[in-house]
Amino acid sequence: MDTLHHCIATYLEHCEYRKRLDQKTLKAYLIDLKQYEFFCSGAADYTSKDMIDRFITDLHKKYKAKTVKRKIASLKAFFHFLEYKGQLQENPFSKIETRFREPKLLPKTIPFHAIQTLLSSLYAQKEQVTSEYQRRCCIRDIAVIELLFATGMRISELCSLKPSDIDLENNSVLIYGKGSKERILQLGNPEVINALNVYQKTFKSEIASCGYFFVNRLHQKLSDQSVRFMINHYAELAGISQHITPHMFRHSFATLLLEQDVDIRYIQRMLGHSSISTTEIYTHVSNTKQKDILVHKHPRNLMEVKKG
């Protein structure tokens, strides 16, 4: 059998050119598989059940459940590839128990009033700026944060948007999600549409030269880190003490729609989740809706109970 190093290289090439996986996924696979390669250093057989079993135990000692799950998934996919290529007599994972209990971590959301305060602060900043450079930055930042909340898209999806993905004639956005899956979301709020139109007109030449819809001050693709810094900056200006991340806009988008009685299947499609079970976690977050139901719609309210 080929060396583990060679097999990993072949597999990653297969993932990049045949499966067309994105760079973020490829990087995660590389990190996870290189870790297994290091663990197997000097071992006679990297395909043995015992070797994989010990590696998984070692992972549980070092990482949280979510990280362990991802690393095991990377390794399973790799061994499935070796089996598919006929390089294994038997897949060792068929005899390894990999299921384990994960703690349910509820997604952190931004309260409705905090989002309102943040957006109000953004627009106020635009009116208070003293230079053209600051005005342009505000125009871009408003468009970024409005779009994040309007669509619930991932920060990586937003930063990867191309000019052709934003259709402001039909008010829709084409999003390339995980696993190269595409989804189209409509833009319904006039203020969001206006923010994008103003941004597109203001940065027309920069967008054309950069090749991406959102650009930084160097006229290059806007980075995830820049958006994180942007949100922290405006949250501080707005006097919001809660630490806000780009992904929290996604969580808030889903939770607030659920509280407005939007069917969870629609939310699943809008978020680009392949499984409804991933979306269902938001049903545990919408306590406001639950309270409203129990206070106003519980059948006990309709009962007239005689006392004494």
Image (cartoon, helix red, strand yellow):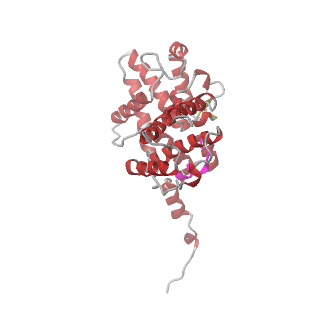
Q: Is residue 191 visible?
A: no
Residue 225: tell me if it is visible: yes
Which residue corresponds to the image point at 45% horizontal and 26% vertical from the top-left?
Answer: 223
Q: Is residue 117 above or below residue 162?
A: below
Q: Residue furthest bottom?
A: 308
The magenta stretch spans residue 278:
yes
Residue 171 picture location, percent across and down: 63, 29
Task: Give the left or right position of residue 232, taking residue 250 as reference.
Answer: left
What residue is rendered at 37% in x and 16% in y?
Answer: 131
Quarter of the figure that contains the N terminus: top right
Is residue 137 toward the left or the right of residue 302 in the image?
left
The chief SS type of the magenta part is helix
Return the residue nearer the eye: 197 or 156: 156
Residue bounds of the magenta highlight:
272-281
Q: Nearer the viewer, residue 300 or 215?
A: 215
- Percent position of residue 72, x then y: 50, 46
Near-viewer residue (135 or 17): 17
Compared to residue 133, the image places residue 226 above or below, namely below
Query: Is residue 103 highlighted in magenta?
Result: no
- Taking the image as shown, residue 188 lies to the left or right of residue 111, namely right
Using the image, determine if residue 250 lies above or below residue 227.
Answer: below
Residue 230: which quarter of the image?
top left
Residue at 51% x, 16% y: name it. Answer: 210
